Image (cartoon, rainbow, N blue to C red):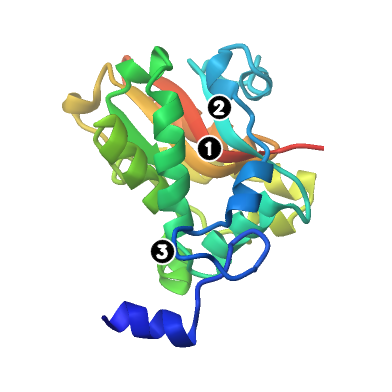
Amino acid sequence: MFKSILNLFFPPVCSGCKVFLASHEIVICTVCRHEIPLTNHHLNLENEAFKKFYGRVPVESVSALLYFHKKGIVQEMIHSLKYRGHEEIGTLLGEWYAEDLKIAALVQTVDAIIPVPLHRRRMRKRGYNQVTTFGLALSKHLEIPYDSNVLKRNVYSKTQSKKSLLGRTEGIDLMFDVSFSEKDHNKHFLLIDDVITTGATLEVCSKALLKIPGARVSIVCMAMAHS
């Protein structure tokens, strides 16, 4: 009842184009949903996202659901999720991608979903990690445990999107570490994040996870920057 009254005075708008949503639409409108650029990475293990990590870190697979273009629908959605508190976007994208990932053979061997963590200072400031709802939705629909305690961020830094390429990689090797016990040995971890840009953060996080004896790492993101 309260939600219906709230929607009467503050009707929900599309996270992509900001038009009012119809009663049957959730988060984004039907037009944006049809125009949203899908990568189909899950259909090809040797995709462009996987190749981005060649020679950098030995990951099992890499994929992203959407292409991220500046001033595009996906950028608007990710920014609404990350900076405006619209965590329901992460849930929706997680539900979408889980259906695709169910047919990916490597994901079927994953033991735990691990989010790229925020530093506790940024977590206090923002109030949430933008990848949490994405990860929880994947966890629910793929029936894989979600674990936010293994990977730790040691160093507080400015938002990556506001840095130059050099700034994004400076000192990054010291930013992440792992906390694990024997039960985490020989596990296949699915590392998740919002957007693949240079891949520097995901590379360092993967290397941290690979410190765990017998660990394997795959990467799944909501989107990938695309020129």
* SS for dot 1: strand
**Label 2, label 3: how many angstroms apart (C-alpha)?**
24 Å
- Residue 221, label in figure: 1
> What residue is pinned by disc 3?
128
Residue 38, picture quadrant: top right
* SS for dot 3: loop
* SS for dot 2: strand
Count residues near mark 2 (Cα–Cα under 10 Å), then give few for <14, some for 14-19, many for 20+. many
The C terminus, quarter of image: top right
Count residues near mark 1 (Cα–Cα under 10 Å), then give few for <14, some for 14-19, many for 20+. many
Q: Position of residue 98 (x, y in %)?
A: 40, 33
Q: Identify whether 8 is placed above or below 54.
A: below
Q: Earlier in the sequence, mark 2 or mark 1?
A: 2
Q: Position of residue 42 (x, y in %)?
A: 53, 21
Asked whether the residues under the numbered discs 2 and 1 touch, taking CB atoms below 8 Å apart as contact, a structural biologist would say: yes
Q: Identify whether 18 is placed above or below 184.
A: below
> What residue is pinned by disc 2?
63
Q: 34 or 71, which is in the foreground?
A: 34
Q: Earlier in the sequence, mark 3 or mark 1?
A: 3
Q: 183 or 34, which is in the foreground?
A: 34
Residue under the point 58% across and 71% down: 20
